[in-house]
Amino acid sequence: MTENIAKVFRLAEDSTKRFAPQKLGWSWGQALFLYGLALIDQENGTGKYTDYLKSYYDYYIAKGHRVNTSDTAAPGLGAYTLAKLTGEEKYYQEAMRVRQYIASSPKVVEDMPNHLGNGIESWFYPKSIWIDSIMMYGVFCSLFAKGEQDAQLMEFAQAQPALFEKYLRDKKTGLYYHCYWTKKGTHYPKTPIFWGRGNGWVTAAISLFADNFSSLQAKEDALRIHKELSIALAPWQREDGYFETIFNKVGKTYKESSATMLIAAGWFYGYRKGFLPKEYLERAKLAFDAVVSDFQVKKGLLSMPYISAPTTPLQVAPYFFYKILPCGNDLKYGLFAAFIAALEYKRCLETV
């Protein structure tokens, strides 16, 4: 294990000291952070973070919460992981709430739910699919369907990569737009503006769910999508290893660590599985090491900078709003990106 992989695992431990579990919100960023901790435990054969996850879910089971959007469905990942680990019914029921949401949520284009579901946000934003959802519900559906032998949910999960490709992939560049407005039948942004983290969601999500698929054809299709996107992404990597928050505006926006780590995770996976050549292993190493080399120490704890804030795909002046979006340290989804990149890097080293 390299020193930089060890640093990411230390970042995970330090982050649990920085953030009390009961103060984490019930949403996508916090959910991915928790799932990343669970994956570290699974990989290393430890239960270091089990109590941390239990504290979070026990708090929200007692307090109550909503599951009515893709973002509020994401905590199903940690809940299902806890259910399998502990055998406790209360965590399984939390995962079942997400399963039921996916089943009951109206589909706005083919078999895809509205990203904003029926939450308050949906009152102000048109019905749409967002590239974020491939991570927020896609990974959970594949995991739950495999674990519970849920044939209906497996069919749904296996259909998602091709649907995201159909509606969000730009045919000219091979990159993915942020969202698709179903009533207007067009992607947003409407001009060729490609958000970094969104494209990172695709590569990383496929690396997390493709092995869960029961259909060999579905898995091959997902890996083909992964490979084609990887080829499209490579020219936009900076010399220092980073990707920018807007890919096709290199030097005009800013380097962004969550997108960089998500892509690195996907490329480590692609090389390990044999469908990406060694060039992508070297690119992934460059990206991973670039982000880790920028880690800081704050109040004695490791800290990850250059994580862009959450964003909404806007109709008016999208490039301007992406460009001015602030970035900061230790945003939870950015930590998750580092965790899964470190895990995939570790697996690559172990298979050499």
Image: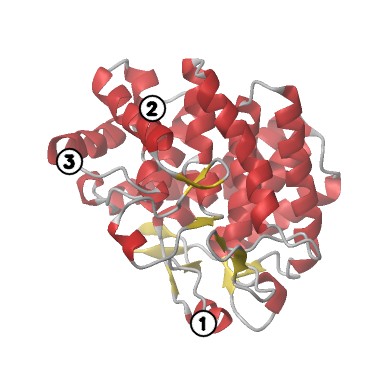
- Above or below, 198 against 244 in this view is above
Instruction: Give amino acid for label 1.
Output: Val
53 on left or right of 195: left
Instruction: Count numbered badges in the picture.
Output: 3
Circle 3 residue: 64
Q: Is mark 1 on a helix, strand or loop?
A: loop
- Above or below, 244 against 300 in this view is below
Q: What element carries label 2?
A: helix
Looking at the image, the residue that sits furthest to the left is 62
Q: Quadrant of residue 194?
A: bottom right
Circle 1 residue: 316
Cα separation between marks 2 and 3 = 17 Å
In what quadrant of the picture does the C terminus appear? top right
In what quadrant of the picture does the N terminus appear? top right
- Pointer 2 or 3: first along the chain: 3
Looking at the image, the residue that sits furthest to the front is 183
Q: Which of marks 1 and 3 is in front?
A: 1
Instruction: Give amino acid for label 2.
Output: Tyr
Q: Is mark 3 on a helix, strand or loop?
A: loop
Circle 2 residue: 80
